[in-house]
Image (cartoon, helix red, strand yellow):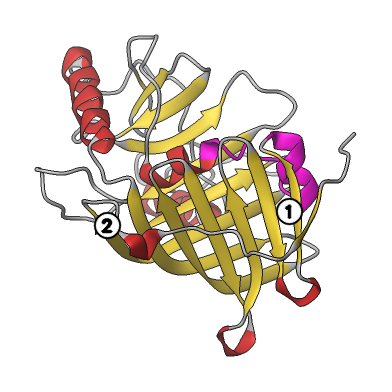
Amino acid sequence: PTRSRSLSPALGFGGYSWSFIVLSILLLNLLGGCTTLPWDPFKIEQTQPQWDVSTIKKKYQEDQAQRLLLPNDWQIDGILDIDHEEEGRRNRISLTSRQGKQLRLRIYGPFKQVAFDLLLDPHWIQLIKPNKRQIVRVPATTKGMAYLTGYTLNPGDLLFFILGKAAPLIFSPTQSKAGIVSQTEPGERLLLDPVHGYILERENALATVNPYHVRYHWPETFSPASAALPKKLAITLEKEEMILTFIFRQWQMSQTNSKQFRIEVPKGFTILEPRIQ
C-alpha cells in the first residue's frame, strides 16, 4: 500500500521540494539534448517573436544577388567526411570549378595520391581511372551519379549547394523556432538566417524518391560587400542513410578565366559508356 502525500508550497509534490523537481527536469533536458534536437527546425511556431517578413525576404534576395556575382572559376581545398553505419571515411579533397559549368572533385588517399577523380559538366559525369587508362562516362543525371559514386544526388545541385545558391521564393517566409522557413519554385524548403538572409538548412520538400537535407556552417564574421562562403556543409542522403560532410579549409577565387582552373580530360584514355537502367 502507498501513503498519499499532500501538496504544499514547502514540500512541492509528493514530499519533494520544488527546487529538487526543477533541478531534475533541467538535468533530464540537458542529457536528452546531447542526442536529439528539441525541435524540428522546419516546424512552424507562430507563438515565437515575429520578424519582419518583408525585410527577411529582401535580405534573402540581396544575399542571392551577391552570390550571382561570385567568380565562376575557383578552387577549394578541404576534407570530405563520409558517415555511414557500414563504412566511414575521412579524406583530403579538392574541388575545382571552371566557368561555373564544370566541376572536378578529387579525393586523395595515402601519400597524396589521387584515389578518386570525378569530372562533372552539364552533359556528362566522367570518372577517371588512371591505373587502367580509362574514363567511365555516364549522363549527368541522378541515376548516372548513383551509378558512378553510389550517391543518389542530382549532380547539377552540387554547385548550388557549395555556393549557397537557391531559386527565388514562391511563398512568403514563415517563422519557425530556429529561424525563417520558406519554399522555392523548384520545391526546396529553406531555413533562412533572419539577420543575413543566407541559407541555414535546405531540403527537397516535394521529392519522395531521393530526399536530401543540407545543413550549413557559416563564418562568424565576413565582409558585407560580398557573399559569405560556407565553412562546412553536411549533405544527408536519406535513401543511403549517409551523411557527406564537406569541410572547406581554403577558398581560392579568381576574377578572370585563369588557366590554373583549367579542367582537362586526359588524352589517350579509353572512354567507356555503360548503359544505365
Displayed quadrant of residue 252 = bottom left
Q: Amino acid at mark 2?
A: Met
**Image x and y of residue 117, in percent:** 63, 64
**Image point 66% across, 67% down: which residue?**
116
CA separation in Å, label 1 and label 2: 27 Å
Residue 213 appears left or right of 18: right
Front residue of 132/112: it is 132
Helix, strand or loop at label 2? It is strand
**Image point 73% across, 48% down: which residue?**
241
**Image x and y of residue 112, in percent:** 56, 84
Residue 27 has which mark?
A: none
Residue lying furthest bottom: 111
Q: Which residue is mark 2?
A: 253
Front residue of 215/43: it is 215
**Image point 42% across, 27% down: which residue?**
190
Q: Which residue is mark 1?
A: 149
Helix, strand or loop at label 1? It is helix
**Image x and y of residue 50, in percent:** 23, 19
Displayed quadrant of residue 226 = top left
Magenta range is 141-157
